Image: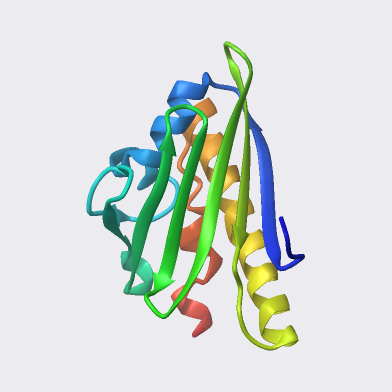
């Protein structure tokens, strides 16, 4: 990274790299632990929409790079204010995959960038924890849905 303005989250997933990779590119699986609806699979040079119905929020996702079982790179956000997200998948053996997520390209004042880095680190840590629970134990923890419960009137 050429800048310190990035968020990073990493996690060991006790599943083969092909299963972990598929869980990120296939919205039928991803919707079990992250967003509630995706308009399509992640394919290189394609655009999809990810929706979090509990928050009435949809975001456009521009797919930049797909390297099967190795790397995914997207730009996401409002068209005039996007950030880059890069997933790297490292098989440690046939049953273990180490996933690293880096979100970069934050803009704004120092305080705004710090807030974005903090929020992104927290968010992607929840995503990886949800992915781990779902793939390893078939448990849907609802981490993303429960992060901002409507009862707290955010």
Hey, which quadrant is residue 12 in on the image? top right
* Residue reaching furthest to the left: 39
Q: In this view, does 56 lie to the left or right of 68?
A: left
Residue 40 percent across, percent down from the top left: 23, 48
Hey, which quadrant is residue 53 in on the image? bottom left
- Work out which quarter of the rendered image holds the N terminus and state it: bottom right
The residue at 70%/69% (across/down) is 118
Query: Total marks drawn?
Result: 0
Residue 34 percent across, percent down from the top left: 44, 52
90 or 145: nearer the eye? 90
Hey, which quadrant is residue 77 in on the image? bottom left
Q: Which colour scheme is used?
A: rainbow
Up/down of 108 relative to 129, above or below: below
Residue 91 percent across, percent down from the top left: 61, 21
The residue at 53%/80% (across/down) is 152
The residue at 63%/74% (across/down) is 116
The residue at 41%/35% (across/down) is 23
* Residue reaching furthest to the top: 94
């Amino acid at each position: 990274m050429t800048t310190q303005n990035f968020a990073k989250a990493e996690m060991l997933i006790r599943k083969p790299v092909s299963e972990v990779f598929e869980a990120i590119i296939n919205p039928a699986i991803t919707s079990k632990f992250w967003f509630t609806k995706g308009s399509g699979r992640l394919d290189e040079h394609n655009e999809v929409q990810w929706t979090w119905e509990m928050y009435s929020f949809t975001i456009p996702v521009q797919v930049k790079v797909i390297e099967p079982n190795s790397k995914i790179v997207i730009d996401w956000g409002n068209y005039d204010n996007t950030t880059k997200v890069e997933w790297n998948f490292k098989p440690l053996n046939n049953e273990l995959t180490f996933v690293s997520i880096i979100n970069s390209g934050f803009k704004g004042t120092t305080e705004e960038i710090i807030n974005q880095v903090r929020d992104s680190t927290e968010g992607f840590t929840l995503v990886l924890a949800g992915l781990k629970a779902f793939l390893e134990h078939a448990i849907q923890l609802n981490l993303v849905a429960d992060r901002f419960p409507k009862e707290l009137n955010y």
